[in-house]
């Protein structure tokens, strides 16, 4: 049985009229006369452009409500201040600068790390920022654009204490999600979220991160980052981080019917629903009985997806014998599983659904056929 509820049949749509996330800027680092970090056979500027183009395509497919802008789409030099200007003038709500790292003389160093603006709490972070900021020496009249900042002066890297901005919390939240996906989706060695004084982040007036996808100075990681598979996994990891971040702001998966000519991304690439055969043979560990809870009562449920049109539940009753039903609210149909008085029971059910392929299932509160905040139910316990 193919229930059709695969990730590639889903678009993430803004279900809040006042959603604050409308524009994302992707910034492939370096370019043109600035190669960035140098591996033994590939340059940083090549790798990050490929990753960014893949990410751009994925965002256009899965987040049609989001306007995606790239600071460069080819091998051209773009000054740091120009990259930030593009984001600021387009009123971007999220800025993602994509880079690769190098550790000269230390080929054993490996892993991803995602930076937000802040003080250099470690010498290693300072060295990364100095390397990325040094590109301004290739710009004409750079003194005019960066307030007298000297990339060769140690004192120049202390100025960033004045730029701890109001977006730091959101930046750290998003950076943490990306690093988590690098670890879980791409199987990378995550070096965590760090703070350092990057000029390109200093001038951006929105939540901003600088992603270091891996070390070109590490022979194994260089091969991975240069490969089509590696670049796609890195882009998918960032995409899934964006997905989780946008959920904070009201984006939900909406079922869609793809056009026949679309080149659909496969399930396995997105680490989501397996084939119909796998779903038939890999049942839930613990079948869920229908609960004696009336629709008027408040309860927890697990949402599989939502749609702007009625969802056909025919054949879904064999999904691990769990209770599957739909709920319509304000023109939006939700496909739900289970009715639970206990959050822990709902969480266990969600985990079981995740394991058979419904990676994007999440817990909601329900009362009188309306979604209510989970926190409201928890506080009533």
Image (cartoon, rainbow, N blue to C red):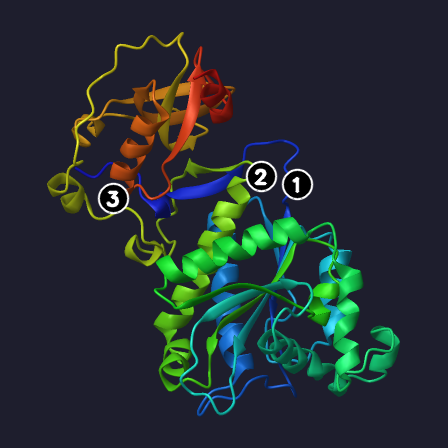
SS for tag 3? helix
Q: Of the residues under marks 1 and 3, which one precedes in the sequence?
A: 1
Residue at figure coordinates x 24%, y 22% from the top left: 323
Q: Are marks 2 and 1 in contact (CB under 8 Å)?
A: yes
Instruction: Say above or below: 149 vs 19.
Output: below
SS for tag 1? loop
Q: Of the residues under marks 3 and 2, which one precedes in the sequence?
A: 2
Mark pair 2, 1: CA separation? 7 Å
Q: Residues within 10 Å of mark 1 (few under 14, many from 20)?
A: few
Asked whether, in this view, residue 174 is left or right of residue 201, the answer is: left
Could you say where residue 188 lies in the image, as x and y percent from the top left? 38, 67
Instruction: Say above or below: 81 vs 256.
Output: below
Query: Would residue 342 be visible to someone looking at this image?
Result: yes
Residue at figure coordinates x 64%, y 49% from the top left: 169
Q: How crowded is mark 3: few (under 14 residues within 10 Å), some or many (20 or more)?
A: some
SS for tag 2? loop
Q: Name the residue under label 3.
A: 355
Query: Would residue 311 be visible to someone looking at this image?
Result: no
Q: Name the residue under label 2.
A: 249
Q: Which mark is residue 106?
A: none
Q: Which mark is residue 20?
A: 1
Mark pair 3, 2: CA separation? 26 Å
Asked whether, in this view, residue 359 is left or right of residue 21, the answer is: left
Image quadrant containing the C terminus: top left
Mark pair 1, 3: CA separation? 32 Å
Could you say where residue 260 lies in the image, as x and y percent from the top left? 35, 49
């Amino acid at each position: 049985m193919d229930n059709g509820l695969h990730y590639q049949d889903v678009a993430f749509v803004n279900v809040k009229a006042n959603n604050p996330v409308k524009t994302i800027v992707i910034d492939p680092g370096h370019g043109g006369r600035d190669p960035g970090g140098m591996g033994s056979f590939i340059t940083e500027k090549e790798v990050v452009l490929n990753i960014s183009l893949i990410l751009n395509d994925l965002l256009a497919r899965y987040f049609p409500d989001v306007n995606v802008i790239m600071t460069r789409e080819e091998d051209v030099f773009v000054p740091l201040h120009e990259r930030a200007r593009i984001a600021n003038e387009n009123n971007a709500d999220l800025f993602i600068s994509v880079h690769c790292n190098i550790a000269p003389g230390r080929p054993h160093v490996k892993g991803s790390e995602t930076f937000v603006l802040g003080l250099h709490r470690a010498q290693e972070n300072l060295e990364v920022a100095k390397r990325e900021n040094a590109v301004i020496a290739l710009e004409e009249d750079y003194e005019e654009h960066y307030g007298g900042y000297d990339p060769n002066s140690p004192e120049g890297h202390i100025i960033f204490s004045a730029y701890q901005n109001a977006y730091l919390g959101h930046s750290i939240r998003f950076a943490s999600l990306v690093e988590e996906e690098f670890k879980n989706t791409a199987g990378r060695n995550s070096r965590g979220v760090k703070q350092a004084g990057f000029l390109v982040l200093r001038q951006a007036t929105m939540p901003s991160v600088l992603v270091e996808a891996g070390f070109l100075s590490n022979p194994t990681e260089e091969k991975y980052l240069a490969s089509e598979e590696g670049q796609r996994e890195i882009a998918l990891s960032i995409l899934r981080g964006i997905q989780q971040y946008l959920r904070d702001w009201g984006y939900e998966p909406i079922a869609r019917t793809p056009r026949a000519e679309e080149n659909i991304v496969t399930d396995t690439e997105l680490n989501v629903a397996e084939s119909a055969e796998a779903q038939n043979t890999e049942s839930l560990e613990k079948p869920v009985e229908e609960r004696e809870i009336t629709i008027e009562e408040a309860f927890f449920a697990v949402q599989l997806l939502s749609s702007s049109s009625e969802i056909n539940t025919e054949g879904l009753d064999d999904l691990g014998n769990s209770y599957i039903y739909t709920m319509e609210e304000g023109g939006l149909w939700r496909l739900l599983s289970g009715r639970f008085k206990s959050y822990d029971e709902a969480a266990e059910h969600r985990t079981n659904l995740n394991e058979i392929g419904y990676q994007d299932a999440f817990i909601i509160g329900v009362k009188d056929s309306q979604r209510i905040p989970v926190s409201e139910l928890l506080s009533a316990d």
